[in-house]
Structures are given as structure tokens and as C-alpha cells.
Image (cartoon, rainbow, N blue to C red):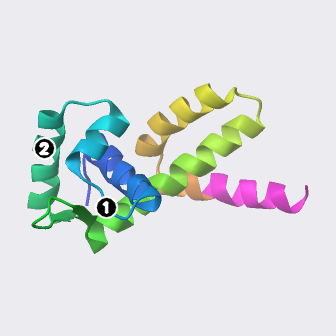
Amino acid sequence: MKIQESAENYLETILILSERSTYVRSIDIANELNFTKPSVSVAMKKLRENNLITVDGDGYIHLTEDGLAIANRMYERHKLLSDWLTYLGVPKDIATEDACRIEHVISQESFEKIRAHVREMNEHL
């Protein structure tokens, strides 16, 4: 399923926040991304309609199986690309920003080749 970059960012943020805390609410996402609460509410509605998240009666957000799969894929890409760019000498803040953009547009085939290269490189360190 092809989803928009913004949805991928929201799902990745929910994953990251859920690793920090047991509960994730819209306000937590708004604070993390520096977005307005109404903007986040609209996005959460769309994610819920696409069965990528659930929201319980207390307003806590949970990733569905499909949402978790997308979030994990984006987070893996982000971490690997950011670390790789930093290793190549790109300053960490720029590497993180660039990785955030690249993670959404890189093909799975290209990412797998980069991942294999990084693993091979790590074996020789």
C-alpha cells in the first residue's frame, strides 16, 4: 500500500513515542513534531480511517499491525541512512534531516543494497 510521506512520518513518530512511554496521545505527537493539535487530530482521523492506528476510549493511540509494519520500515530506513551518512562524514544534524527525506523516496531495492553494503562494511571494521 502506498501512503503519503506525512502519514509515514506520523506513524514513525507514534512508534518512537511509544518506545519512550507506555501511552501516546495526539498532544504528544503535536509536541514532538511541533504541529498544532488540530493538524494532528485531522491526521489521526485519516490514519484511523485507513486502519493504521486505533484510538482507545482514553484517547491513547496504538499502531495496528499494518501501521506498525510501516512505522518499523520507516524507522529502520531513517536510522540506517542517518548512521551511514554520519559515517561518511556528514554532520549529524544534516545527516538526520537528509535521512528523513530520503527514507520516503528510496526504493526498497536501493535501500536493501545500501543496508547490505553497511552490514558488509561493519563486518570489516
In which quarter of the view is residue 24 placed? Answer: bottom left
| Residue at screen point 59% across, 59% down | 112
The residue closer to the viewer here, 66 or 64, is 64
Q: Is residue 3 left or right of residue 121?
A: left
The residue closer to the viewer here, 24 or 98, is 24
Specify the quadrant that holds the N terminus: bottom left
x and y, in percent, of residue 113 in the image: 64, 56
| Residue at screen point 69% across, 26% down | 91
Q: Is residue 57 left or right of residue 74?
A: left
Mark 1 or mark 2, which is nearer the start of the sequence? 1
Q: Is residue 58 left or right of residue 97?
A: left
The mark lying in front, picked from 2 and 1, is: 1
* Residue carrying label 1: 23
x and y, in percent, of residue 98 in the image: 54, 31
Within 10 Å of disc 1 (Cα), the crowding (few <14, some 14-19, many 20+) is: some
Specify the quadrant that holds the C terminus: bottom right
Q: Amino acid at mark 2?
A: Ser
x and y, in percent, of residue 95 in the image: 61, 32
Q: Which residues are magenta?
A: 113-125
| Residue at screen point 70% across, 28% down | 90
* Residue carrying label 2: 41
In which quarter of the view is residue 86 placed? Answer: top right
Q: Amino acid at mark 1?
A: Tyr
x and y, in percent, of residue 92 in the image: 66, 31
Q: Is residue 42 above or below residue 115?
A: above
